[in-house]
Image: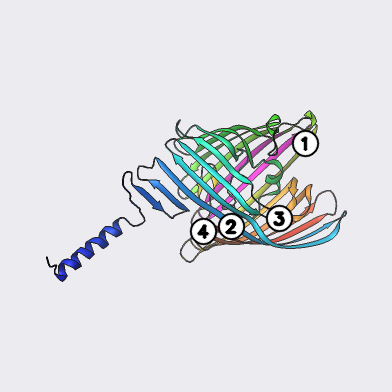
Amino acid sequence: MKTSSCSVLALLMLGAISTSTHAGQVRTDGQDIILSTKGGLKLETEDKKAGFQIGGRLHWDYTQDETNTAANGNQTLDDFDARRARIALRGHFNDFEYKAEFNIAESGNSGGSAEDLYVRYKGFGEMANLTIGKQRVPFGMDVLTSSNDISLLERSAMTERYTLGRSAGLKLSGRGMDKKFTYGIGVFEADGDGANDFQDQATAGRVTFAPVLTKESVLHFGAGYQTIGAADPLDETDTMNFEVAGAFGPFHAQAEYYDSDVGPQNFNGYYAQVGYILNGGGMRPYSDGVFKRVKAVPGGTWEVTARYEEGDGRFNDVGLAFIDAQQTALGLNYYMNDSVKIGVSYMDAKSNTNADNGNELRMRLQFTY
């Protein structure tokens, strides 16, 4: 049977329309599977009951550190390496989800360590998620903000001193139906990845409330408490934390205060940080008690940011370690698109107890997928 040219053309047009309708999807026998490349390579059943996603990040940094201390004199260090290189696997099946994120390489070590390694049960609803494994400890805003999303290239020296970051344990967390309220509470290993680390336990909890939460503005308050056990009671640590943050159009700000008792000693410190998004980038996104990454507009988005901090902190980035000091940081970021960010920051710190001082210039090419 012969087919006319018009019939062939009609069939081709019908096929093109059908292909366009289902762009970005892979369909199979049985349950349909959807392939997505937004924010990583993701496979998910059409009913969303099961899925699998691969992602990663590469933060390639150049740093120049200048440190002047009474103990070591003047020192200048230049470095060019991967601050972070990670691959992440995550997935879900019905009410369970998991995440396994590993360091392939990281500045200062050979890599190969686990960042996140957990299973989460979400069958109780948004108000109660149960997570078992290595995960973020619910304490502090800066530390809970992803390294992909922080505005300055390094976190506060106060965050570095008083928070655990990630640890293996058990956590219960959730959020209110209006998404203005969040909480997290859990028990974790106090330190290390050895065979007896759970003997010295850490407990931590955090609550946040955003009385203002719209597409144009957000006002955030938070508080947390953390106890880190030790074999010697004089080494036990009790730390409280208070947070305030906001975003109003292109302007955003956040501040945290920490107060910590280590046996009979008391340590404390704070930081305050501001930022401004240029050329129509909109408001800095906010979700689940933390800020997210600035969105790129066509042609790229620019952001300027600054931070001041003072108190007993961990000033390792400028070579001053654990001291009472004050530090100022300035930063400039260019968000080329949703995956690529170019940033530069400068930090300058001075001891409050002697003449020790240090500074750091850091530049970063960031790729996330």
Give the residue type that dot 3 points to: Thr
53 and 358: which is toward the camera: 53
Which badge, 2 or 4, comes first in the chain's sequence? 2
**Stretch in magenta:** 238-263
Give the residue type that dot 1 points to: Asn
| Residue 92 among those drawn in magenta | no
Find the distance from the CA under tag 2 to the CA under tag 4.
Answer: 10 Å
The residue where tag 1 is placed is 266
Quadrant where the N terminus sits is: bottom left
Instruction: Please tell me whether mark 1 sits on a helix, a strand or a loop.
Output: strand
| Image position, residue 71 (x, y; %) | 87, 53
Q: How is the image coloured?
A: rainbow
The residue where tag 3 is placed is 328
The residue where tag 4 is placed is 339
Pair 2/4: label in front: 2
Do callouts 2 and 4 mark residues in contact (Cβ within 8 Å)?
no
The residue where tag 2 is placed is 58
62 versus 147 height, above or below: below
Pair 4/1: label in front: 4
Q: Residues within 10 Å of mark 2 (few under 14, many from 20)?
A: many
Find the distance from the CA under tag 3 to the CA under tag 1.
Answer: 24 Å
